[in-house]
Image (tube, grey):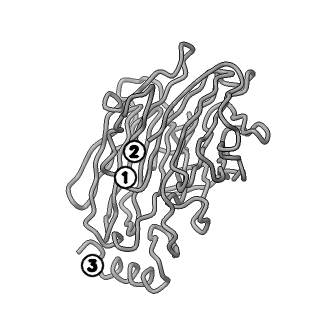
Amino acid sequence: MHNFTQNGAQNRTDMAGVRPAVRVVAGHPSADGAGVKIHRVAGFQSQDFSPFLMVDEIRSENPDDYIAGFPPHPHRGIETLTYMLSGEFEHQDHLGNRGAIRQGGAQWMRAGRGIIHSEMPHQPKDGGAVGMHGFQLWINMAAKDKLSKPDWRDIQPEQVREIPLDGHGSLARLLAGEWQVNGETERAPLLDAAAHASVADIRLAPGAQINLPLPEEHSVLVYIYRGALDSGRGVVDRGNLVLFGAGESLQLRAPENAPEAGTGMLVLHGKPLNEPVAHYGPFVMNTREEIEQAVRDYNNGTLTE
C-alpha cells in the first residue's frame, strides 16, 4: 500500500530509503495497428520493467494519425490496460464484449490463451473538438496463467478514484492496485483485474513533491506524459520513462518552472515475474516453442479454443 504526502519544502524523509533514479529510457516514434502513430517505450527483455513490457502513448490533434485504429488482431500471454486522457476508444472481441471508454476512463483486457479484438477510435458526431491522447500498457502474465481464460472490463471516468493531493491542483487518479492516501486505504477500480500491476496517474503542480512508500521487492517505472520530472539526477522531459532502483519509498517532484502548468505521470509498479520472455508481435510467452505454437494456433483458427 502506498502513502501520498506532499510538501513545498525539501522532503525530510530518510534519504537512505528513497529509491534512486537509475536509468532513463527514451521513448521513440513508432506505428502500430493500421498505421496509428504512437510514442513507444519497450522493455520486453529487461527485468527492471517486469511485470510491465511496454508503454505506448497516442497523442495527436490530427485524426489522420490515429483514425484507422487497430482492426481485429490476436493476443496471447499478456494483459493490457488502456487509459484515455482525451478522445474515445471502442473495444470489441470474439467473446462478444463491446464497450467504449470516454475521456478519463480505462479498460483492462486479459488475453490469456487467446483473444481476437479490435480497438477503434471514435470521433465526435457533433462537430466538436477532435484529437486523442491516451496510453496502452502491456503487462506480462505469469507462465502458469498464460493459457487462462480471456477476460475484459472497462471503467468510465466517474468510476476512477480521484484524490486531491494539495490545494494547488495536484491529484492522484487511481486505476489499478491498492493505495493508502491521507491515511486511508483506497482500492482502485481495477484492483482485482490487473493482478500483478498497480497503476496511477499522478499530476503535480509546479514545485509540488510527493513521497510514495512502495513494496521494496517491486519494480517501479514512471512515464512522464506532461511537463517534466525532477528525478534527483536531472530533469527528465515528457515522452521518457524513468526506472527507479531499490528502496522503501519513491519521491517525485515537479520542477518549479515545469512547462504545461505542471507534471503528469503514469506511476507503475509491480512484483517482477523473474521468468524468461519470448516475444513475437502480439504474442508474449516464455519460450520460442510456445511462440511458434501460438502462431500455428492463430493460423489454424484454434488460438481462442
**How far is disc 1 from disc 2 in space, using C-alphas?**
8 Å
Question: Which residue lies at the image location 59% right of the left edge and 45% below the top edge?
Answer: 248
- Total labels drawn: 3
Residue annotated with mark 3: 302
Extreme residue toward the top, this view: 167
Q: Amino acid at mark 1?
A: Ala
Mark toward the start of the polypeptide (1 vs 3): 1
Instruction: Tell me where residue 10 appears, x and y as whole percent.
Output: 72, 25
Q: Which residue is denoted by mark 2 in the rendering?
A: 177
Please name whichever residue, 304 or 246, is drawn nearer the observer in this view of the structure.
246
Quarter the N terminus occupies:
top left
Q: Residues within 10 Å of mark 3 (few under 14, many from 20)?
A: few
Secondary structure of residue under mark 3 = loop
Q: CA distance from mark 1 to mark 3?
A: 26 Å
Q: Earlier in the sequence, mark 2 or mark 3?
A: 2
Secondary element type, mark 1: loop
Name the amino acid type tagged 3.
Answer: Thr
List x then y, in percent, for residue 99: 27, 44
Q: Position of residue 301 (x, y in %)?
A: 28, 78
Q: Which mark is residue 194?
A: 1
Depth check, mark 1 against mark 3: the one in front is: 1
Q: Residues within 10 Å of mark 2 (few under 14, many from 20)?
A: many
- Which image quarter holds the C terminus? bottom left
Furthest toward the right, the residue is: 234
Lower position in the chain sequence, tag 1 or tag 2: 2
